[in-house]
């Protein structure tokens, strides 16, 4: 029998999911404690827009691994908060670009600081070498499952 047989609680996706959920909950708590009424899902869109403003809704979905309906709902809510606006593309009227408003700009620094604080809390007592090993393993798992041969 294979050395990699399934054992409850040892499935890597379960362990990764638990860690991901714990980090997201802590970041949400840190946002709330700082007086920010912003969800982690909303922040993930803002994060990508801070890196490259004016992305299409489809590109935001691709970058955040979310479906069309989820992206639409998140953008609707960010619009209600006055943090983004949809702008019709000048080259293709079928495409909406999502652009940051002036109100979103000041949030970048504070949310980055809170994200860094959260990651410091999460990675307490974990060495740089251990972090690199985990990053490399998860990258290889991702690459294995998204290779063109499997898709």
Image (tube, helix red, strand yellow):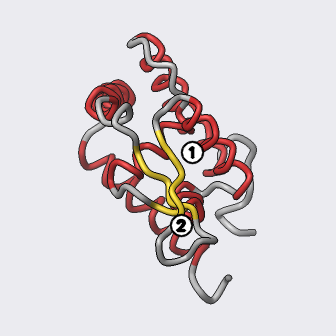
> In percent of the image, x 34 and y 48: which residue is there?
50
From this view, report whether residue 83 is shown above or below residue 68: above
Q: Residue 75's x, y, as percent?
A: 59, 44
* N-terminal-most mark, 2 or 1: 1
Q: Is mark 1 on a helix, strand or loop?
A: helix
* Quarter of the picture holding the N terminus: bottom right
Towards the viewer: 87 or 121:
87
Towards the viewer: 132 or 105:
105
Total count of labels: 2
Q: Residue 11's x, y, as percent?
A: 67, 50
Asked if labels 1 and 2 touch by Cβ distance under 8 angstroms, the answer is: no
Q: What element carries label 2?
A: helix
> In percent of the image, x 40 and y 45: which residue is there?
100
Q: Residue 39's x, y, as percent?
A: 55, 29
Towards the viewer: 122 or 68:
68
Q: Residue 16 carries which label?
A: 1
Q: Mark 2 points at which residue?
A: 142
């Amino acid at each position: 029998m294979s050395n990699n047989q399934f054992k409850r609680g040892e499935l890597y996706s379960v362990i990764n999911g638990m860690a991901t959920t714990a980090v997201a909950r802590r970041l949400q708590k840190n946002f709330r404690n700082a007086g920010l009424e912003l969800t982690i899902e909303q922040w993930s869109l803002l994060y990508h827009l801070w890196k490259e403003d004016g992305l299409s809704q489809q590109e935001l979905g691709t970058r955040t691994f979310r479906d069309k309906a989820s992206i639409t709902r998140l953008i609707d809510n960010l619009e209600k908060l006055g943090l983004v606006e949809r702008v019709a593309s000048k080259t293709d009227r079928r495409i909406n670009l999502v652009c940051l408003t002036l109100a979103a700009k000041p949030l970048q620094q504070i949310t980055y600081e809170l994200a860094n604080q959260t990651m410091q809390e999460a990675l307490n007592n974990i060495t740089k070498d251990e972090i690199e090993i985990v990053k490399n393993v998860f990258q290889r798992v991702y690459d294995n499952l998204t290779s063109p041969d499997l898709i």
